[in-house]
Amino acid sequence: MSRRKIVIFAAVFATVLICGYRAYRWLADWPERRKGPEHVLQLDFTPPFLTDDLAYQEALRAMTLDGYDSAQWQVCQDGRTHAPDGSTDKYLLRGPDPMCGSVELLNKNGYDVRSVLLELRGSQVASRVYVPP
């Protein structure tokens, strides 16, 4: 193989490698780009777990802070999970950790959905709006 062919091959190989790495990083960071900024609310008390009412209020607050018109969004009822005290969660979809969960909101156009991810950290509630794919 001539020197010129080796240089061309190396340049093409390096270009493919760099483009592949950038595509990988873009895909790896894709979920993070779909999340809005984190909002933290300091409470005057420390609840034992994330309650359905607190999650509902914080979901609406996070949407407003991210610039969404609250008149155009309605909170979806879920009812699949239960709080540690045995009460049924009306809006909060709780995972295995009683301090975390999400609330879904549906735009009045019937198509757009937003999830608000919530986490109770002692006497603070962190919330972040997520745009599902």
Image (tube, helix red, strand yellow):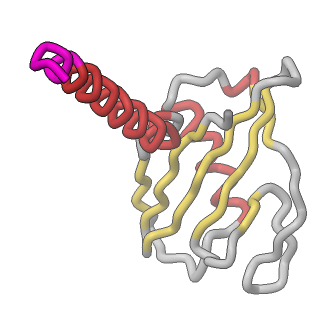
Q: Nearer the viewer, residue 128 or 88?
A: 128
Judged left or right of residue 12, residue 45 is right
Q: Over which residues does the magenta segment extend? A: 1-8
Q: Residue at x 67, y 43 (%)?
A: 115
Q: Nearer the viewer, residue 1 or 30?
A: 1
* Relative image position of residue 89 (x, y in whole percent): 82, 66
Furthest-front residue in this view: 1
Q: Residue at x 83, y 71 (%)?
A: 81
Furthest-bottom residue in this view: 85
Judged left or right of residue 101, residue 86 is right
* Relative image position of residue 106 (x, y in whole percent): 80, 33
Furthest-left residue in this view: 3
* Relative image position of residue 73 (x, y in whole percent): 75, 28
Judged left or right of residue 35, residue 17 is left
Total labels: the figure holds 0
Residue 108, picture quadrant: top right
* Quarter placement of the N terminus: top left
Q: Residue at x 41, y 31 (%)?
A: 23
In the rendered image of this protein, does residue 46 appear above or below residue 24?
A: below
* Quarter placement of the C terminus: top right
In the rendered image of this protein, does residue 89 appear above or below residue 8?
A: below
Magenta residues, dominant SS class: helix
Judged left or right of residue 17, residue 37 is right
Residue 15, picture quadrant: top left
- Residue 2 shown in magenta: yes
Q: Residue at x 43, y 46 (%)?
A: 39
